[in-house]
Amino acid sequence: MDVGNLRIHFAIFLSVLECCVGQQALPPGPVSGMLAGNVTFPTNSPQSPAQQFLTITWTFKSSIGPVPVVSSLPTLNNIPAAYEGRVTVNRTTGSLELRQLTLSDSGVYAVNMVTEKGVTLTGETNLDVYAPVSEVTATANTTSPVEFNDTVSVTCSARGSKLFFKWLNGTSEIVSGGRVSLSNGNRTLTISSILRYDSGPLYCNASNVFMTRRSVNVTFDVYFGPDNAVMTTVPQNNLYTTGSNLTLSCSALSNPPAELHWAFNGNLLVQVGSQLKLDSTLESQSGNYSCWAYNSKTQRYKPSGSSQITILQKISGANLTGPSGPMIAGNSSANLTCQAKAGHIDSREWLKNGKTLSPSDTVTISADKSSVSIKPVQVSDSGEYLCKLTNRVSNDNAVYKLIVSYGPGNVKVDGKRAVEVGTRVELKCSAESVPSATFSWAFNDTARNVITPEYIIDHATYKDTGRYTCVASNHVTGLNASFVHTLSVKEEGSLPGELSSGAIAGIVIGVLVAIVIIAVVVKKVMKKRNFHQLEMCAGPRKTNERIESPY
Ligand SMILES: *[C@@H]1O[C@H](CO)[C@@H](O)[C@H](O)[C@H]1NC(C)=O
Ligand SMILES: *[C@@H]1O[C@H](CO)[C@@H](O)[C@H](O)[C@H]1NC(C)=O
Ligand SMILES: *[C@@H]1O[C@H](CO)[C@@H](O)[C@H](O)[C@H]1NC(C)=O
Ligand SMILES: *[C@@H]1O[C@H](CO)[C@@H](O)[C@H](O)[C@H]1NC(C)=O
Ligand SMILES: *[C@@H]1O[C@H](CO)[C@@H](O)[C@H](O)[C@H]1NC(C)=O
Ligand SMILES: *[C@@H]1O[C@H](CO)[C@@H](O)[C@H](O)[C@H]1NC(C)=O
Ligand SMILES: *[C@@H]1O[C@H](CO)[C@@H](O)[C@H](O)[C@H]1NC(C)=O
Ligand SMILES: *[C@@H]1O[C@H](CO)[C@@H](O)[C@H](O)[C@H]1NC(C)=O
Ligand SMILES: *[C@@H]1O[C@H](CO)[C@@H](O)[C@H](O)[C@H]1NC(C)=O
Ligand SMILES: *[C@@H]1O[C@H](CO)[C@@H](O)[C@H](O)[C@H]1NC(C)=O
Ligand SMILES: *[C@@H]1O[C@H](CO)[C@@H](O)[C@H](O)[C@H]1NC(C)=O
Ligand SMILES: *[C@@H]1O[C@H](CO)[C@@H](O)[C@H](O)[C@H]1NC(C)=O
């Protein structure tokens, strides 16, 4: 043996050794194929295209023993009936193509290849034939769970071999943790204490190495609520006048939508629904309103906050009544009472002649301010009284004019005390009195038929001398008061300061005559005298132009 032959033999020896230790003819498996599909078992270290294997033998190691698949010689292929038409061997690489796979083709395949140089290569690998993924379904044990209360489990099932499962929430994969857990090889998704946000859609992906199929979407109609029950009032206010139309609205977050009930002062009303209409309201409808949201699925109630609604009638027909009989100063007492025909009165205010009425020794305002008592009335109590009635939605006023009667007082007669005979005499009597006094006159204690304040004598005679008594009467107070005026009639000319009409006429005529006489005299003098004399008379001024100049 030369060294070259030795080397070859050593190589053969080594390869035989390798065969038994490494089975290096095939890459590590397994080889996968789809049911009804084709698969190729690849080999390692293919020969150069020019060199072919002498023999290639593929064997299926079934449970009942080895079954030949193909035995390939350079000139013929030996294929048993079970593999007829289903196998092809590549004589260059030794690889086997197996077609129209059935599930029973799964198992261990062994190869034995002999090279032209007589080297035997062997190997084993696994074939996995996969049934396709189909009929992926996801089934929940409930699709309408109650929030917080219920645990939901959804199970994914599918046909196919070597399946694995994933659960998806939208596009993101669901992993175990918190309320969510995966079990049963990731087939079953369990969500405990389900929340409204868990409604989905969820789906499962069932996969094998060849394919993935998804289930239909699973959604949960999670019953929740009611939450956030809120009541609103239109128009938005707390205070309304009677006759207003109000609409109370209620809403709540709830699935299914909540039944909305209404409560008034804590008692449920018969009305149900999202709106409570109060038309042409009455004061008796004032009170506390609230709504109750009820979810029959979750069997939970939720009250809204309550709203205190006040309905007030406007004050109308304010009426200030006072005494109807006469009021006599210092004697009568007056009761002013302020009422209204309709409307609750919150506050009352009293004004007298536009200013706040203040109580005094004689003026008492009742505690509730509904009446004012004046006892006794005084002159200063006269005036216009106003009472102002107010409530939160309106106000109204009423007035009363209080007239306090008094007098007569301070009776006096104006007129001359002494006159000349023949002259006119006018006496005027006055008195302070409410109502105005009536007057009567007496002369020397004898009543005269004069009932005017004035007593007139056109031409006084001596007989008119005497005492004139004016009696002032107030028919309301029933009081009289008098004043005595003394008149004396004197002879003509006896009263220096007093000129009769005749005398006045005489004086006027006398004065006129005197002026005429003077004028005549002056004219005569001017004719007789020259300018110089006149100038001397007028003084040392030089120019006569100045005297005449203004005209
Ligand atoms: C399997 O191989 C046959 C023959 O080469 C071919 O007609 C068929 O389409 C192949 N099938 C698949 C699923 O590749
Ligand atoms: C055998 O495999 C080799 C390498 O993949 C390829 O080039 C050749 O065409 C194949 N021979 C046949 C007959 O298919
Ligand atoms: C659904 O399955 C889970 C887990 O088995 C269980 O806890 C839950 O009570 C079930 N829910 C219903 C509505 O049956
Ligand atoms: C499933 O839900 C997704 C949203 O996550 C949606 O885009 C998709 O159209 C749904 N598929 C079906 C079949 O309803
Ligand atoms: C289940 O899913 C998780 C995460 O997707 C994964 O790590 C785990 O291997 C899976 N379990 C099975 C049995 O498929
Ligand atoms: C799905 O995602 C939403 C947010 O996108 C989350 O609120 C919900 O809890 C998730 N559901 C599950 C079952 O993980
Ligand atoms: C789930 O399956 C669908 C359809 O087969 C696929 O488009 C999607 O990529 C898969 N998602 C995941 C996370 O595997
Ligand atoms: C209230 O509603 C009634 C009809 O329901 C209507 O006749 C009345 O005018 C309304 N009152 C007001 C103040 O709008
Ligand atoms: C939900 O659970 C609470 C106690 O945890 C229970 O009182 C209530 O009745 C449950 N609701 C429903 C609809 O089962
Ligand atoms: C005020 O009230 C009195 C008695 O209560 C009544 O006689 C009078 O008519 C009323 N006046 C008005 C204006 O209502
Ligand atoms: C005034 O009215 C009050 C209450 O109405 C009554 O008690 C009082 O006697 C009245 N006074 C007079 C003077 O009428
Ligand atoms: C009136 O009385 C006065 C004195 O008081 C007397 O002088 C006079 O004569 C009387 N006149 C008449 C007309 O009686």
Image (tube, rainbow, N blue to C red):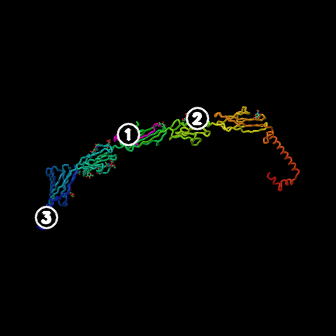
Name the mark nearer the viewer: 3 or 2.
2
Q: Horizontal and vertical percent for residue 230?
A: 41, 43
Q: Read off the magenta span.
A: 283-304
> What residue did someone put label 3 on?
10
Mark 1 or mark 3, which is nearer the start of the sequence?
A: 3
Q: Does the residue labelled 2 lie within 8 Å of ligand 11?
A: yes
Mark 2 or mark 3, which is nearer the start of the sequence?
A: 3
> What residue did someone put label 1 on?
259
Q: Is mark 3 on a helix, strand or loop?
A: helix
Residue kind at label 1, given as amino acid type: Glu
Q: Is residue 138 left or right of residue 382?
A: left
Q: In this view, does 166 lie above or below 334?
A: below
Q: Horizontal and vertical percent for residue 292?
A: 39, 40
Q: Horizontal and vertical percent for residue 341?
A: 53, 35
Frontmost residue, 368 versus 550: 368
> What residue did someone put label 2 on?
323
Q: Is residue 274 left or right of residue 416?
A: left
Please identify the quarter of the rendering in which residue 220 is found: top left
How packed is label 1: few (under 14 Cα within 10 Å), some, or many (20 or more)?
some
Name the mark nearer the viewer: 3 or 1.
1
